[in-house]
Amino acid sequence: MMAKHKIYTMSFGSVYPHYVTKAEKKGRTKAEVDEIIRWLTGYSQAELDAVIEDGTDFETFFEQAPEMNPNRVQVKGIICGVRIEEIEEPTMKEIRYLDKMIDELAKGKKMEKILRVDTLKK
């Protein structure tokens, strides 16, 4: 069995500020970052705040997510040099979905595009 990737054991709360910083540097907000995370995972804001505070690691964060959004499969493309669609490891795929969406936020995409709202109408 392969050793777990380092990010799995990192606390979500220790990485979260980097998502917020990345967004804010580009004129976006913490509220938008939270909205993306809630959309992806089904956590309420209170649940999300608790997870950020309590040191929950990435793997547990995704395993215990109330409801992973079925539309997250619409999140495609390359992140960190890897094509999301080709990632086989489930937890890593979830992490990369989140990375990609935060990236899109920082690049100035509209929230409805990031949250794949238009894909629901088809």
Image (spheres, helix red, strand yellow):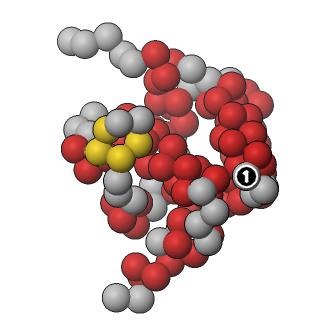
In what quadrant of the picture does the N terminus appear? top left
Name the residue: 45% across, 55% down. Answer: 68
Q: Position of residue 3 (x, y in %)?
A: 32, 11
Name the residue: 23% across, 38% down. Answer: 88
Name the residue: 36% across, 41% down. Answer: 93
For this orientation, the residue located farthest to the bottom is 121
Q: Position of residue 90 (x, y in %)?
A: 31, 39
Residue 54 appears in the rendering: yes
Amino acid type for the residue under numbered disc 1: Lys
Is residue 80 toward the left or the right of residue 106 in the image? left
Q: Residues within 10 Å of mark 1 (few under 14, many from 20)?
A: few
Is residue 46 toward the left or the right of residue 84 in the image? right
The residue carrying mark 1 is 26
Name the residue: 47% across, 23% down. Answer: 8
Which quarter of the figure has residue 51?
top right
Which quarter of the figure has residue 80?
top left
Is residue 73 toward the left or the right of residue 96 in the image? left
In what quadrant of the picture does the C terminus appear? bottom left
Considering only vertical position in the picture, is 18 above or below 98?
above
Considering only vertical position in the picture, is 21 above or below 9?
below
- Secondary element type, mark 1: loop
Q: Position of residue 26 (x, y in %)?
A: 73, 52
Residue 51 appears in the rendering: no
Considering only vertical position in the picture, is 119 above or below 106?
below
